[in-house]
Image (cartoon, rainbow, N blue to C red):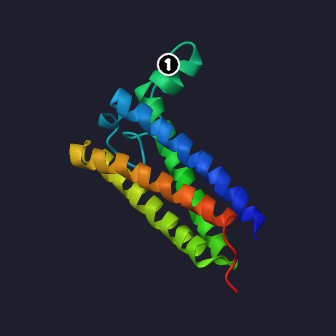
């Protein structure tokens, strides 16, 4: 069984979990109502006044611009990592369920990123906000499924 994929799936679980936690800060601070542009934040690539709070670490949890930027960055890293994982998974002999899980993972992350960007651009309509939070649960469930299948299934021959 491809050990590298197992390790990558565990890292992916951590990254998805961290992205979800950062999304909780976005929701809690109502940071989605600020900087309703993408990919830039207003007309800048980096958050304006991103490090204005003292001590500096507070910005990661209490600065609306930084919290939103962190979530964007983590979401895009998750997307890139899932794309790389999916591409690598296609090159291995996996069980049918693990292969299906990899495909579902790609679908889930594409839908989740699309929902997140749409939610932001449309100024956080409640329906999209709820769908984006539900999408986080779907994505987490799929990455857990992939981890389980990579550890508990035999490759297809």
Q: Residue at point 49% right, 25% down?
A: 61
Question: Is residue 136 depicted above or below 29 in this figure?
Answer: below
Q: Quadrant of residue 156?
A: bottom right
Q: Nearer the viewer, residue 14 or 110?
A: 14
Asked if residue 14 is positioned above or below residue 90 in the image, the reply reads above
In the picture provided, is 66 more to the left or to the right than 127? Answer: right
* Label 1: element kind: loop
Q: Is residue 21 left or right of residue 93?
A: left
Residue visible at 48% across and 30% down in the picture: 66
Residue 45 visible in image:
no
Residue drawn at point x = 44 percent, y = 39 percent: 23
Residue 156 visible, this orientation: yes
Instruction: Give the side of residue 20 with respect to residue 122, left or right.
Output: right
Of all residues, the one furthest to the bottom in this rendering is 157
Quarter of the picture containing the C terminus is bottom right
Q: Residues within 10 Å of mark 1 (few under 14, many from 20)?
A: few
Q: How many marks?
A: 1
Q: Quadrant of residue 34?
A: top left
Q: Give the percent coordinates (x, y) of residue 75.
A: 50, 49
Residue extending furthest top? 54
Q: Which residue is mark 1?
A: 52
Q: Residue 26 location in percent, x, y?
A: 40, 34
Asked whether 124 or 54 is in front, the reply is 124
Name the residue: 57% across, 51% down.
77
Q: Can you say whether 119 is above or below 102 in the image?
A: above
Q: Position of residue 84 (x, y in %)?
A: 63, 65
The N terminus, quarter of image: bottom right
């Amino acid at each position: 069984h491809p050990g590298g994929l197992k390790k990558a799936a565990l890292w992916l679980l951590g990254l998805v979990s961290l992205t979800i936690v950062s999304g909780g800060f976005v929701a809690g601070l109502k940071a989605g109502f600020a900087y309703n542009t993408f990919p830039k934040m207003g007309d800048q690539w980096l958050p304006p006044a991103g490090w204005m709070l003292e001590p500096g670490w507070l910005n990661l949890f209490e600065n609306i611009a930084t919290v939103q930027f962190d979530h964007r960055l983590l979401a895009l890293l998750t997307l890139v990592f899932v794309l790389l994982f999916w591409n690598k998974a296609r090159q291995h002999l996996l069980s049918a369920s693990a292969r299906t899980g990899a495909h579902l993972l790609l679908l889930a992350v594409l839908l989740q990123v699309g929902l997140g960007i749409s939610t932001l651009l449309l100024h956080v309509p409640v329906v999209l906000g709820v769908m984006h939070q539900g999408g986080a649960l779907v994505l987490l469930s799929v990455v857990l499924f992939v981890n389980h299948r990579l550890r508990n299934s035999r490759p297809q021959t």
